[in-house]
């Protein structure tokens, strides 16, 4: 946050149900609520990314004056943090599976589904983000899934961070693939029909034999430069294989 005051306000807004924060922080009571603002901002972000969420655009969508929104949330950064926490309420962590490894696989898939449903989450800065009730409940649930493992508390946190980082990286690839198809108006297969001959004309024969061999195998299988969904499942299994000795 930009100032200490904004950080304090953020905590009170995140925990507004417990803190009794319902209306604007100053001025007369108005006809919108903080929940209304957050819900509308999420809808704008889902449609157009975080860049679509400005106080002016949000105010226009809600039919209020831009300055009135600042009586509810002091900055856009505060608003984004509220949005992130609210989204976490809509994607519960899965129930326990027979093994800790299987439980972590369920967590990873749920987190990836959240990122694909709300791609703007990948644009939000996660570092030093104050945890609200929904994000904290999620963290608590993830820790519960690891409670039976004979590991240190720091290792528990590191495992959760590892899973989150892997999911985020793959989700970026998946969102990029989807965005490319939308922006260009053509499928990956059609794009390669155009680019492939051009590339073959400029790349010297035999210059990149391994890339050519592997790329051809991938392209033949997926009709695309890659397959983020398949890469996710393959990578997740390898990450969990690496954790298995520690967790068992």
Image (cartoon, helix red, strand yellow):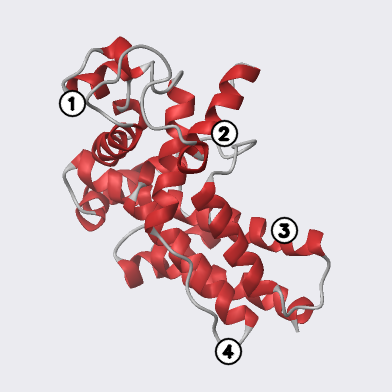
Quadrant housing residue 163: bottom right
Q: Decide which of tag 1 and tag 2 comes sooner along the chain.
A: 2
Residue corresponding to mark 1: 61
Quadrant housing residue 54: top left
Whole-percent x, y for residue 7 in the image: 60, 25
Q: CA distance from mark 2 to mark 4?
A: 37 Å
Whole-percent x, y for residue 224 in the image: 32, 60
- The answer to whether marks 4 and 1 mark residues whose Cβ atoms lie closer than 8 Å is no
Q: Decide which of tag 2 and tag 4 comes sooner along the chain.
A: 2
Q: CA distance from mark 3 to mark 4?
A: 21 Å
Residue corresponding to mark 4: 98
Q: CA distance from mark 1 to mark 2?
A: 26 Å
Q: Quadrant of the C terminus?
A: bottom right
Asked if residue 5 can be seen in this view, the reply is: yes
Q: Decide which of tag 3 and tag 4 comes sooner along the chain.
A: 4
Residue corresponding to mark 3: 157
Q: Element under label 2?
A: helix
Q: How many marks?
A: 4
In this view, the mark in front (2 or 4): 2
Q: Element under label 4?
A: loop
Residue corresponding to mark 2: 11
Give residue 72's mark: none
Q: Decide which of tag 3 and tag 2 comes sooner along the chain.
A: 2
Q: Element under label 1?
A: helix
């Amino acid at each position: 946050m930009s100032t200490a005051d904004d950080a304090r306000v953020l905590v009170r807004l995140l925990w507004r149900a417990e803190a009794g924060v319902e209306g604007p922080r100053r001025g007369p009571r108005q006809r919108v609520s903080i929940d209304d603002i957050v819900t509308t901002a999420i809808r704008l972000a889902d449609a157009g990314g975080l860049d679509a969420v400005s106080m002016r655009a949000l105010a226009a969508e809600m039919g209020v004056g831009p300055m009135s929104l600042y009586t509810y949330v002091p900055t856009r950064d505060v608003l984004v943090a509220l949005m992130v926490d609210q989204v976490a309420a809509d994607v519960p962590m899965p129930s326990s599976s027979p093994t800790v490894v299987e439980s972590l696989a369920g967590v990873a898939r749920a987190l990836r589904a959240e990122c694909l449903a709300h791609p703007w989450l990948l644009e939000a800065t996660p570092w030093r983000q104050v945890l609200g009730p929904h994000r904290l409940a999620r963290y608590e649930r993830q820790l519960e899934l690891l409670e039976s493992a004979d590991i240190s508390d720091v290792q528990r946190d590191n495992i959760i961070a590892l899973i989150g980082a892997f999911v985020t990286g793959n989700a970026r690839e998946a969102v990029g693939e989807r965005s490319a198809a939308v922006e260009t108006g053509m499928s990956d297969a059609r794009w390669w029909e155009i680019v492939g001959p051009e590339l073959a004309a400029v790349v010297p024969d035999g210059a990149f034999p391994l890339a050519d061999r592997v790329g051809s195998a991938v392209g033949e299988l997926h009709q695309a430069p890659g397959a983020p969904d398949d890469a996710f499942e393959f990578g997740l299994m390898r990450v969990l294989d690496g954790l298995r000795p520690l967790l068992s």
